[in-house]
Image: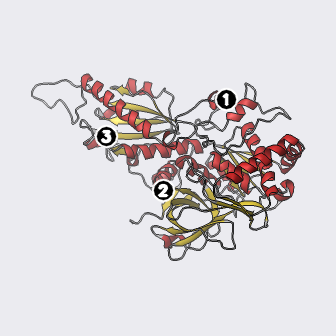
């Protein structure tokens, strides 16, 4: 079991706690909020016939399902005394207790500013100072995910202060101009930490992130610290995550994908059957209060500005019944994510609608909801969600030409920036011409990034682009023509018709840093240098 995952008792303890949402203004609450209401003190599943109450509210800020990243700052420094007519000190101003106390105060103020700027749940622990190996060993006994090492002086402690847990990580900070001189600014080269590279990264895994490399060293710049922490926050909430799979787990063109997801990423896949869905829908749809609830929710959804209905209203009402069942499952199984197999076939007959709208609503609320149960694409989708803090658009891609590619699917989130609702036309699902599916209009000029996984091979491709059009081709309803930045021609020979995972903004730097920790090859086509 991944140590970054909570057990059931811990889940319920933290479920109701409010966590700092940073710049998003998110209601930073666990997906298990409902689970805490519907399960017993030992975390057992809800008793038969007693599901958690579900409320759909389009005005509610999205939930944040990620566990806060706990960071232990450590100041490693020497205690030196002046000796006559000999070289008694090395480079550094932090070589005695008064200087160390002053430096800890400086670090504390800087970290307060860093925590305030974090756009993800971040918990910075009280900084500690270390002057010998015994103190370094005591630090390792703490409860944290990341060591933020201030390598001031006493180089013999630098390695000892790095986290000893192979599933944890270390970021090393040294000063050039941001404060008193650090010896680490001069000495931290290959003598202490190796340069990152393919041969080294391929040895890493979810269970062993490898040792500290030069990629973990930052000079002066807290922005460089922040994006690395954001990447590690995403990684910590990705590895070992729980996901409900309606109709079982699959993999597009790669049937080994579910097992690879379980082994490589330690994903916990909870399979539920279509018979279970049919039974729940039958119970819900027999309740007059539920019918009234779905009509009311439909009224509220259609009242959101720039919402156009171009299919039968009944399809949306039935989609809200699906949504309620999915929310119940997320609570009962203590999972922030759900995916659906046979979403273009079986579910249509069982629900008498399509799942597109239900998945879109869940993504808009801050959960993770994917169609097609494609565990080739779902792992990068989970990581990208937690790194960006935004909904992820799982879509098909087309043949790149003149920098352009069309990205299209029928389950687009509408709150792609985590705040506002984009304009939408609610149409039928394209392939079936049945049910309800959102055609989202993304802003022209919107910067986006995407991950294209090479099936179950340990290689992910990074893509950055700009939305140039929202066309209306005879393809999946939500569709964007995206102008690819960087070396776009390299996408031509990539695996065709595989799924890409898109978010607003550019998080390719964070993704590359995170996936190297677990032994994946990262190919960022947006980079223009060799």
Q: Earlier in the sequence, mark 3 or mark 2?
A: 3
Residue that badge 3 annotates? 174
Residue that badge 1 annotates? 12
Q: Is residue 80 left or right of residue 251?
A: left
Mark pair 1, 2: CA separation? 34 Å
Residue 521 pos. (x, y %): 51, 57
* Mark 1 residue element: helix
* For residue 47, above or below residue 511: above
Residue 47 pos. (x, y %): 83, 32
What residue is shown at x 75% (from left), y 53% (from top)? 340
Mark pair 3, 2: CA separation? 27 Å
Find out whether the residues at labels 3 and 2 contact each other: C-beta distance under 8 Å. no
What residue is shown at x 77% (from left), y 58% (from top)? 343
Find out whether the residues at labels 1 and 2 contact each other: C-beta distance under 8 Å. no
Residue that badge 2 annotates? 506
Residue 470 pos. (x, y %): 59, 68
Mark pair 1, 3: CA separation? 39 Å
259 or 223, which lies in front? 223
Visible in this render: residue 28? yes
Residue 505 pos. (x, y %): 50, 56
Indicate the quadrant where residue 457 lies: bottom right
* Mark 2 residue element: loop
* For residue 469, above or below residue 5: below
Indicate the quadrant where residue 147 lies: top left
């Amino acid at each position: 079991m991944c140590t970054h995952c909570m057990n059931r008792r811990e889940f319920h303890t933290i479920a109701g706690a409010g966590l700092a949402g940073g710049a998003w203004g998110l209601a930073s609450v666990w997906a298990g909020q409902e689970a805490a209401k519907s399960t017993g003190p030992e975390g057992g599943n809800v008793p038969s016939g007693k599901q958690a109450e579900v409320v759909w509210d389009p005005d509610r800020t999205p939930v944040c399902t990620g566990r806060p990243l706990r960071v232990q700052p450590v100041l490693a420094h020497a205690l030196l005394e002046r000796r006559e007519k000999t070289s008694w000190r090395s480079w550094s101003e932090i070589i005695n207790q008064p200087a160390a106390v002053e430096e800890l105060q400086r670090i504390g103020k800087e970290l307060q500013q860093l925590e305030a700027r974090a756009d993800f749940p971040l918990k910075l622990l009280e900084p500690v100072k270390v002057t010998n190996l015994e103190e370094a060993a005591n630090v390792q006994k703490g409860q944290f995910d990341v060591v933020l090492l201030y390598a001031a002086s006493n180089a013999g402690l630098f390695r000892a202060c790095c986290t000893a847990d192979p599933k944890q990580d270390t970021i090393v900070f040294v000063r050039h101009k941001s404060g008193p001189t650090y010896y680490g600014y001069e000495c931290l080269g290959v003598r202490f930490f190796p340069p990152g590279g393919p041969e080294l990264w391929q040895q890493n895994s979810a269970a062993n992130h490898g040792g500290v490399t030069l990629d973990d060293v930052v000079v002066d710049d807290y922005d460089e610290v922040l994006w690395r922490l954001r990447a590690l926050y995403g990684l910590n909430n990705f590895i070992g995550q729980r996901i409900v799979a309606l109709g079982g787990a699959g993999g597009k063109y790669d049937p080994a994908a579910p097992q690879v997801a379980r082994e490589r990423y330690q994903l916990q896949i909870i399979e539920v059957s279509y018979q279970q869905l049919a039974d729940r829908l039958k119970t819900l749809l027999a309740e007059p209060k539920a019918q009234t609830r779905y009509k009311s929710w439909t009224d509220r959804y259609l009242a959101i500005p720039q919402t156009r209905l171009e299919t039968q209203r009944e399809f949306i009402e039935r989609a809200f019944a699906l949504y309620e069942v999915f929310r119940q499952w997320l609570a009962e199984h203590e999972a922030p994510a759900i995916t659906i197999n046979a979403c273009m076939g079986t579910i249509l007959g069982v629900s008498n609608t399509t799942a597109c709208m239900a998945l879109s609503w869940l993504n808009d609320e801050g959960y993770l909801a994917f169609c097609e149960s494609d565990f080739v694409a779902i792992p990068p989708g989970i990581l990208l969600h937690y790194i960006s803090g935004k909904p992820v658009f799982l879509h098909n891609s087309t043949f790149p030409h003149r920098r352009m590619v069309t990205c299209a699917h029928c389950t687009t989130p509408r709150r792609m920036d985590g705040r506002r609702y984009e304009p939408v036309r609610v149409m039928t699902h394209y392939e079936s011409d049945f049910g309800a599916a959102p055609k989202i209009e993304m802003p022209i000029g919107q910067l986006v990034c995407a991950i294209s996984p090479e099936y179950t091979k340990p290689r992910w491709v990074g893509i950055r682009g700009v939305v140039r059009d929202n066309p209306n081709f005879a393809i999946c309803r939500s569709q964007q023509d995206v102008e690819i930045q960087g070396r776009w021609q390299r996408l031509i020979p990539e695996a065709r018709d595989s799924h890409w995972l898109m978010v607003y903004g550019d998080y390719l730097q964070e993704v590359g840093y995170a996936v190297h920790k677990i032994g994946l090859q990262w190919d960022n086509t947006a980079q223009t240098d060799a």
